[in-house]
Image (cartoon, rainbow, N blue to C red):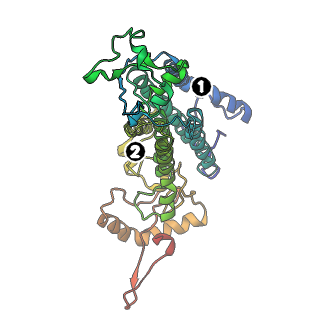
Amino acid sequence: MLPFHRRDVRREPSPATTDKHLHAGDSRGKQLRRFVVGWIKIAWRDLLTLAVLGAADLGIYEAPYAATRNFPITFDKSGDIVYPQFAYPARGWIVSPALSGVICVVIPVVIIVLAQIRIRSFWDCNNAVLGLVYAVVASSLFQVIIKQLIGGFRPFFLDVCQPDISLAKTHNATGLNGVGFHQIMYTVEVCTNPDKQALKNAMTSFPSGHSTTAFAGFVFLFLWMNAKLKVWADFHASFYWLAVLLAPLLGAALMAACLTVDQAHNWYDICAGSVIGTVVAFMVYRMCYAAVWDWRFNHIPLRRHRVFDYAAAAALTPDVLGKALFVRKLGWGRKRRSGRRAARGKARIGSNSSSVAAAYAGNGSTVMPHEHERGVRYPEPVTVHPNGGGQYYGRGENMV
């Protein structure tokens, strides 16, 4: 039995159990070892790529700042420096960069893994966890390259720099001190702070790494939860699922917005990082799953060496497609029925099949209800009857 394998699914031949690496006569431990070896053979290139990109991310982040930027220094009548955009106090991080990375990876991973108690799909867990890491690593590398080559001053730059313009005459290797209109533009050569790492940090504001990581991790989690909960599907979902679905977006927004409180970033740094993280999250989710917004397929994890047949899948019903779902509603994610329940299901199909088909055709549904060989079918639509008083009765479970 493979990890997270559904217990309610019949023991029947499938690609996973008929794989040449799995033998029915082997012990469960031996099957698991062979499965792990097979998974490593499939995933080792991605794991190696993650390691290389992660090392490149860290190496580029630690490299010297490449750009030379000018900043203005003007004085009021008292002789104080006046340029409030970069004159905020250096208060320190509300959420440190390291803690931000942990939050944006660990919390989504914990949610995904805990959800497998109900979903019980190894490949869904595999695609979701690896996809989350792909999104965070790829977006972080993207933003750190821009940060090192382009960068920008943080709102507390002058507080860290502590400039002394009298140094411009003796510290002007770039030739860019005391230049521009009224000669008010200077470089970090006039800074008196000896901490080079602090100066570099104060000059690498664009784009925001916090917001990039937050939106990469939590937007990916949002897309995954949307697929598993079917909030926007072919039925009216319960409002509390929508509230749950919005939680990752709220988390990302809070992590990004707190950067305006501690004055660690300018608003445009935060917006740029949010866009980078969101775009990469969408790209990675579509790479790992059959769709992003198509409610019929967006919960299905794609396999590396198997082509997903969209045309054939479109003719199937939710009880067949919905094997990797959290929601249990209107056929989505429900267990297979067998025995007397299946027989009763078959009996109901004969009497209601024409009305069900007509109802779904009237709704514009492309997924027509039909009987399956195991007695599993798409649930009937709500049957309502007028009582003469303007009220309608129907089964409550289908109307929630």
Q: Nearer the viewer, residue 383 or 70?
A: 70
Picture residue at 72% right of the left edge, 30% below the top = 30
Q: Can residue 321 be seen in this view?
A: no
- Reading the image, the residue beneath label 1 is 40
Q: Position of residue 280 (x, y in %)?
A: 41, 35
Q: For this view, does 99 lie left or right of residue 293? A: right
Judged by depth in the image, the label closer to the viewer, 1 or 2, is 2
Instruction: Say which element carries label 2.
Output: loop
- Reading the image, the residue beneath label 2 is 292
Q: Given the current orientation, which residue lies at the most extreme front position?
A: 78
Mark 1 packing: few (<14 Cα in 10 Å), some, or many (20+)?
Answer: few
Q: Is 97 rendered above or below residue 60? A: below
Find residue 71 and name its label: none
Q: For this view, does 82 lie left or right of residue 107? A: left
Q: Where is residue 46 in the image (x, y as percent from the top left)?
A: 51, 25
Q: Position of residue 36 (x, y in %)?
A: 64, 29
| Residue type marked 2 | Val
